[in-house]
Amino acid sequence: MIRIAAVGDIHMGLDSKGVLRPAFETLPNCADLLLLAGDLTRHGTVEEARVVAEEVAGLPVPVVAVLGNHDHHDERPEEVTAALRDAGVRVLEGEGTVVEVDGARVGVAGTKGFGGGFVGRSGSEFGEPLMKEFIRYTRRCAEGLRTSLAELAEQGCDTRVALTHFAPVADTLAGEPLEIYPFLGSYLLAEAVDEAGADLAVHGHAHAGTEHGMTSGGVPVRTVAQPVIRKAFNVYHLKGGRSAEAAAAASGSA
Amino acid sequence: MNDPANVEYRIAHLKERLAAEELGELGIRIEHRGSSVNVVGTVPTSHCREELLRTVNDQLAGLTVHCDIVVADAAAPDHPEEVA
């Protein structure tokens, strides 16, 4: 069994120092790794990123993160990433990482993702350059997620998790106004997850959403936005091995 | 001052302020209902809550405002979910 702790949208500022640390120090008792699903800061400043870094520095479980839109607001995502990496956080964007848990290989593929909407109600690569680039950017994020999940399968990961900030499905947006769904996620992320296979997809971003969802390919989706889960983090227990089967099925059908 | 269109624009400007100012806040629901405005959501810290309420009261001065703003719970979970 793999024990995955996850939280997103912690929106730490300079007044947040130490708020989550007491809960994070319980992680060795209940989890094998911690996933951070983006929007770790409020404005994406390096100072705020250092608060986040201090909150997770030295934890005895691996910490894997993606950035969110807030973490880009100050337009210094590289510096935010560097501050987190200095504290040992594995920050992913279109790439994967492997965590060893009692001999099992757990792969986490991550991308911030982006918006565009869901099937039948989505934007298209059409019209103004800005509109085309909006969707193309989401496609690039989704392609990074798909390829990194596929690579994790090739690397023999028993369990694979897709980590994004934006939502891959509309299920977990229930509670948000329908009008803003295209700004909250994209079906392209779910399509990538279903094509490459995963045991769990975790995201944040939707503060008024609903925790549980599922892709059309049957991958469980959980939003871990802190305003939704109302805790410092949630813990998900996964059985290993299913993603290898899913990968074989996916490659057989390709 | 309180005609519906005016209230809607004031709500829109409040949302712009919450995003642009200290809070960087995009996740609060602010809705015009009947003769009042409801402000609902979760913020990261008690300081954020105070700042949000100050901004709401400033931007919506003269209107009846009902606020339900809670601070995010930072407690560890007491049980896991077994994902089937």
Image: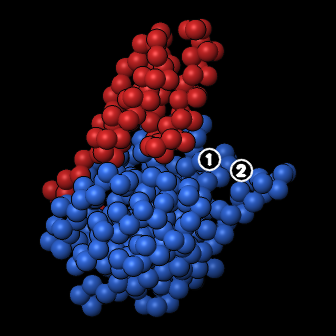
Chain colours: A blue, B red
| Residue A239 in sight | no
Residue to which mark 1 is pinned: A182
Which quadrant of the figure has residue A140?
A: bottom right
Badge 1 and badge 2 in a common chain: yes
The residue type indicated by label 2 comes to Gly
Q: Position of residue B16 (x, y in %)?
A: 57, 35
Q: Position of residue A10 (x, y in %)?
A: 36, 54
Whether label 1 touches label 2, CB < 8 Å: yes
Which quadrant of the figure has residue A29?
A: bottom left
Q: Quadrant of the C terminus of chain A?
A: bottom right
Residue to which mark 2 is pinned: A123
Tag shown at residue B38:
none
Which quadrant of the figure has residue A65?
A: bottom left
Q: Position of residue A75 (x, y in %)?
A: 59, 61
| Residue A143 in sight | yes
Q: Chain of mark 2?
A: A
The residue type indicated by label 1 comes to Pro
Please state if A129 lies on the left or on the right of A140 as rendered.
Answer: right
Residue at 18% across, 74% down: A28
Between A48 and A234, the residue placed more toward the observer is A48
